[in-house]
């Protein structure tokens, strides 16, 4: 069975109701199930340290609510997080003010040992387009207070701020950018992936020439088992800057490759000696740990090696966000997966999304039109040629360049649906980039099909540099590439009905924790002229 066939057989198509939540019934059903479990739960929990060591989070908002998450782990780096193998009742409450004096909802959820004592509460029944605040309590211990935000009602959204960010390798630097994102308090954070890195821990001065800014506790090996992945998430989530960002704004999370394994594709490992069955087991462990540590809805809970990660958010009639999965159903990479001159990348059967997801996306393009149509995904979509010889096309097989027919199908669907304001959000490459998108990059039209904003890494790759050594050649070879930068940071998007403004925020060095944010460059896209205009 192919990866794409498995997609059709084992995953249901996500409609609007499933993607945005099931309303009050979901909360009532979860609490009813919890009531039975709580009769057998740890009745009087007491902890030597805070059970909320890994922080709190909100995510996947709807017009009437959002998910709130935590994981109980008083000893987060011990197997099981220092928790007994028993269910535990966790109280939660929602308030209209940060002081938590105007409570509007509350309840009890069950933290189960088989789910690493994580809690996912789908809150519903709230007012659209406003901030709410939440916290948890167990055994007399209170979590910090977090901020959630509901999506605006139809025809009521005029302006939102969204941050796109990802790629946060622990050893490469401090998560300073997350601290500044927390200060920004955006309406929404799109995490494009590489939340963790699955590699064996790097020892300073021994495993690589590049600087190891901080060492992972316990020097763990490569993530292969469920316990390995749970430990890796715990290490990353102990970071105070990452915790602050989660507490400050709702996240919509995706995964890329390093949540499972570098450059994986479907059921194919990057290592040829790993069987499909063995890699399916690794996917199962990786997806379960990802779900346990993200503020996701129950509709995203994995089933073995399968997980429903693509979904849709509507920001009133201002923007439609299609969150894509470019790993689980893609064709295996060709030409050794790296940079190559590769005619096989143009084969018509190659895919990045799989047949079912392509059909879901195509149908979404014809939904009642939002002002901006956004594809939030993982790897760069625009063609990116690194060879300055005009007669030679050398591209990266792990990006959309490795499946050009899939990109052609997508761009044809956008054109047929007459999408006038297409914006693509990407990451993965540890560089800031800004592209104009064309149906034919060899014969670009005067008016682009859309634009793509690629966010650099939070820390991966170390300090980086403002101007890559080959920047001038890249800009000349790729005239649709309008900006390239290799510092660390994030992209802050301010979306209004008439303009989309993208601020590329960089933080200087991540080898020290005191990096200061600056807007390295700004692009403005006008709703009637979808091309990149540099702005000061």
Image: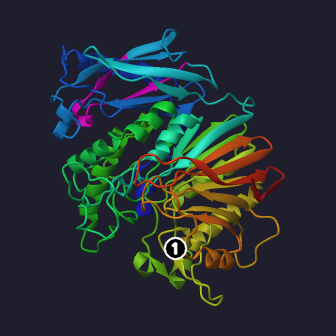
Q: Nearer the viewer, residue 314 or 497?
A: 497
Image-quadrant location for residue 279 = bottom left
| Residue matched to label 1 | 402
Residue 121 among magenta residues: yes
**Residue 10, can we see it?**
yes
Span shown in magenta? 108-125
Report helix, strand or loop for mark 1: helix
Residue 202 position in % (x across, y down): 26, 61
Q: Image height check: is 363 above or below 314?
A: below
Residue 467 position in % (x across, y down): 58, 68
Q: How many marks?
A: 1
Q: Image height check: is 26 above or below 171?
A: above
Residue 179 position in % (x across, y down): 47, 40
Residue 302 position in % (x across, y down): 36, 44
Image-quadrant location for residue 50 = top left
Q: Nearer the viewer, residue 233 or 53?
A: 53
């Amino acid at each position: 069975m192919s990866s794409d066939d498995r997609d059709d057989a084992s995953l249901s198509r996500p409609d609007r109701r499933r993607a945005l939540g099931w309303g009050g019934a979901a909360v009532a059903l979860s609490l009813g199930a919890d009531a039975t479990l709580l009769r057998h739960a740890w009745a009087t929990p007491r902890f030597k340290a805070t059970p909320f060591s890994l922080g709190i989070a909100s995510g996947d908002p709807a017009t009437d609510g959002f998910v709130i998450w935590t994981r109980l782990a008083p000893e987060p780096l011990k197997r099981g997080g220092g928790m007994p193998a028993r269910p535990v009742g966790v109280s939660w409450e929602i308030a209209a003010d940060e002081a938590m004096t105007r409570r509007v909802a509350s309840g009890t959820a069950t933290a189960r040992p088989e789910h690493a004592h994580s809690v996912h509460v789908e809150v519903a029944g709230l007012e659209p387009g406003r901030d709410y605040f939440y916290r948890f309590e167990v055994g007399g211990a209170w979590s910090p207070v977090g901020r959630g935000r509901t999506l605006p009602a139809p025809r009521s959204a005029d302006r939102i701020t969204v941050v796109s960010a990802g790629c946060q390798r622990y050893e490469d630097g401090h998560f300073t950018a997350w601290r500044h994102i927390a200060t920004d308090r955006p309406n929404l954070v799109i995490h494009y992936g590489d939340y963790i890195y699955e590699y064996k821990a790097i020892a300073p001065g021994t495993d690589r020439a590049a600087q190891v800014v901080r060492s992972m506790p316990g020097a763990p090996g490569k993530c292969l088992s469920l316990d390995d992945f749970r430990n890796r998430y715990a290490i990353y989530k102990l970071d105070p800057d990452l915790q602050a960002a989660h507490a400050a704004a709702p996240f919509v999370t995706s995964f890329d490759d390093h949540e499972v394994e570098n450059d994986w594709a479907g059921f194919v490992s990057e290592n040829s000696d790993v069987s499909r069955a063995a890699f399916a087991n690794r996917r199962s462990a990786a997806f379960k740990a990802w779900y346990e540590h993200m503020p996701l809805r129950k509709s995203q809970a994995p089933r073995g090696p399968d997980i429903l990660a693509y979904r849709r958010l509507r920001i009133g009639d201002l923007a439609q966000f299609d969150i894509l999965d470019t790993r689980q159903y893609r064709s295996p990479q060709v030409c050794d997966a790296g940079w190559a001159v590769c005619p096989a990348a143009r084969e018509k059967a190659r895919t990045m999304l799989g047949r079912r997801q392509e059909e879901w996306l195509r149908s979404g393009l014809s939904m009642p039109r939002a002002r901006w149509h956004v594809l939030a995904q993982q790897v760069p979509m625009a063609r990116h040629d690194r060879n300055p010889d005009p007669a030679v096309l050398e591209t990266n097989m792990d990006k959309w360049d490795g499946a050009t027919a899939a990109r052609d199908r997508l761009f044809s669907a956008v054109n047929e649906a007459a999408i006038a304001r297409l914006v693509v959000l990407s990451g993965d490459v540890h560089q800031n980039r800004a592209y104009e998108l064309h149906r034919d990059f060899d014969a670009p039209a005067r008016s682009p099909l859309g634009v793509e904003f690629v966010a650099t890494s939070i820390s991966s790759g170390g300090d980086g540099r403002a101007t890559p050594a080959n920047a001038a050649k890249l800009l000349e070879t790729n005239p649709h590439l309008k900006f390239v930068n290799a510092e660390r940071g994030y992209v802050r998007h301010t979306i209004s009905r008439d303009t989309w403004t993208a601020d590329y925020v960089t933080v200087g060095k991540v080898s020290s924790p005191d990096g200061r944010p600056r807007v390295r460059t700004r692009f403005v896209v006008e709703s009637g002229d979808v091309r990149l205009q540099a702005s000061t």
